[in-house]
Image (spheres, grey):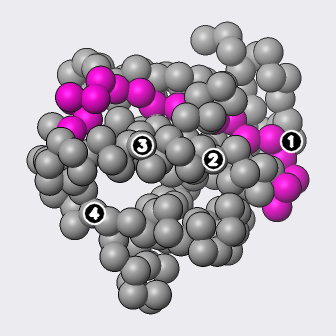
Amino acid sequence: MLVIVITGLPGSGKTIVSDVARELGLPVITMGDIIREEAQQSGIPSSTASVTLRLRGGTRFIAYKTLEKAPKTSVLVIDGARSIREIDAIEEVLATNVVLIYIVAPWRLRFERLLRRGRPDDPKTIEDFLMRDLRELKYGLGDLIARADYVLVNDEPINEFKEKAQKVLTHLVTQYGGHESGDSQDRLTL
């Protein structure tokens, strides 16, 4: 089984990569959707739901909830992991190694994107934006960059970034789609 996990700070471009995966016919499950659903059921404010749910339910709670809803397929894309513990949970439950794609983008660009996106939990001020980044990084998101198999920089026009994402995803599906696991060194060659 090939499991591709997409991660990065808010506004970095995870949704764009997920959309490209869907366009390629890959099944995608978004941890943010699970968080919003759980927050609504629990009455937790959407602005703090990501960290609050993970703290209340345990470090692997959202990963487990996500996997409960994940389709049983040979290739799966999961959008939104926030810590090494979540990656570990996914690997343990699915008995396979995860290929981690970390998306980065300049902070000013991410802030502008979040202002335009306008989700209820998106920051409205630069102070809220920076505090959200700090919460996400403190929880463990920053540690994932060291674990990443691929780091995609999203500071270019959207079509160019989509092409970059498509190239990586196509490579992964071609290289690992039919294998139980791959050689981690192969993951770095593209």
Identify the residue position indicated by label 4 in the image: 121
Q: CA distance from mark 3 to mark 1?
A: 36 Å
Q: Residue at x 80, y 41 (%)?
A: 97
Q: CA distance from mark 2 to mark 3?
A: 14 Å
Q: Mark 4 or 1, which is nearer the eye? A: 4
Q: Determine whether 105 is above or below 181 in the image.
A: above
Identify the residue position indicated by label 3 in the image: 134
Which of the 4 image quarters holds residue 159?
top left
Identify the residue position indicated by label 2 in the image: 83
> Could you tell me which secondary element the residue under label 1 belongs to?
loop
Nearer-N-terminus badge (4/3): 4
Q: Determine whether 175 is above or below 91 in the image.
A: above
125 vs 121, left or right, is: left
Nearer-N-terminus badge (2/3): 2
Q: Residues within 10 Å of mark 4 (few under 14, many from 20)?
A: some
Q: Residue at x 40, y 80 (%)?
A: 44
- Please check the rendered image and state whether residue 94 is part of the magenta-colored stretch, yes or no: yes
87 vs 40, left or right, is: right
Nearer-N-terminus badge (1/2): 2
Residue 180 marker:
1
Q: Mark 3 or 1, which is nearer the eye? A: 3
Q: Which amino acid, mark 3? A: Leu
Asked if the residue at tag 1 contacts the one at tag 4, i.e. Cβ–Cβ closer than 8 Å, the answer is no
Q: Residue at x 53, y 71 (%)?
A: 53
Q: Which amino acid, mark 1? A: Glu
Which stretch did the figure color magenta?
A: 92-111
Nearer-N-terminus badge (4/1): 4
Q: CA distance from mark 4 to mark 3?
A: 15 Å
Residue 14 visible within the image: no
